[in-house]
Amino acid sequence: ATSLLANGCEIVGLKRKLSSLRRIEAISPKLTLHDVEEVDIPALFNQHKKIDVVIHTATCYGRNGESIDQVQEANLTFPLKLIDAAAASGGGLFLNTDTVLDKFLNPYALSKGQFKEWGQYFARQKKIRFLNLRLQHFYGPGDDESKFTAHIVKYCLANVPELKLTHGEQQRDFIYIDDVLSAYMLLLSKQASFNENFVEVEVGSGMAIAIKEFVETAHRLTASTTHLNFGALPYRTGETMFSQADNKALQALGWRCHYCIETGLKLVIDQERKAS
């Protein structure tokens, strides 16, 4: 939101009643915020006249005991209301945050995949332009502990006796949050260069490393005494063993990844230490 404001954008945001505004506290007076529990989505678009771009980043991973119905509501039903209202108000651009996970891995991935297909439908009907960003494993300061990267850093800093892990052979494309934000801003500024109504772009560093290497790097940078018990946990059914972004499209637009794993993790660790 800070970057959007700096570029002269007017921002209408949707949040939950219980959403923490900690990350946007400094700029919240400059935003027009609505609670999703109380707002009528079509009426919202009418109220704010022409909304040129919808940036959809809301999601529910199902990590905190949410039911399948709750996951589906957040990842499919809610964004369907958004895209339908956006299309009815005159179209524009719908920038969707998607996952690289296999569609049938879990309810989260399935619901995200189903919404992408709805986006393709609206785009084929020429009701809206749909820019689908397939986001790799992003991380950064202030992440919820339910995320793997935040969980590892927090537990290593706390020097818990043991961390039970899989063998860690899965390879993931970890990308620091500031690199993600720069990709979003670049794509928004270059949206006129996309000729199709449906465009898909992969957002990642373009380099995959083993999860074991990521964990060992966090362990080293925190000087942790925690025992890393690799192999104590089994792989998930249908586990993706290799995931790496093909970011040639982003690079062709002038984007570059500026944060390596070591640099990104140091920033996360420093922030976590300050917050403790």
Image: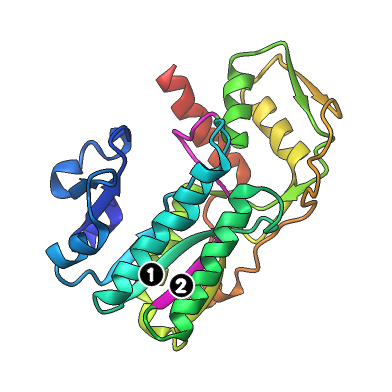
Q: Nearer the viewer, residue 147 or 128?
A: 128
For the residue labelled by badge 1, is the local secondary structure a helix, a strand or a loop? strand
Report x, y in % for residue 6: 22, 57
Q: Earlier in the sequence, mark 2 or mark 1?
A: 1
Report x, y in % for residue 190: 38, 77
Disc 1 target residue = 94
**Amino acid type indicated by mark 1:** Phe
Distance from disc 2 to disc 1, alpha carbons, whole Å, reads 6 Å
Rendered-image quadrant of the C terminus:
top left
Q: Which residues lie in the magenta part?
A: 129-145
Q: Is residue 231 left or right of residue 149?
A: right
Residue drawn at the location 53% of the way across and 78% of the way down: 252
Answer above or below: position of 202 versus 68: below
- How many numbered marks appear? 2
Residue drawn at the location 76% of the way across and 49% of the way down: 171
Q: Quadrant of residue 271?
A: top left
Q: Residue furthest bottom?
A: 195
Q: Nearer the viewer, residue 242 or 223?
A: 242
CB atoms of marks 2 and 1 within 8 Å: yes
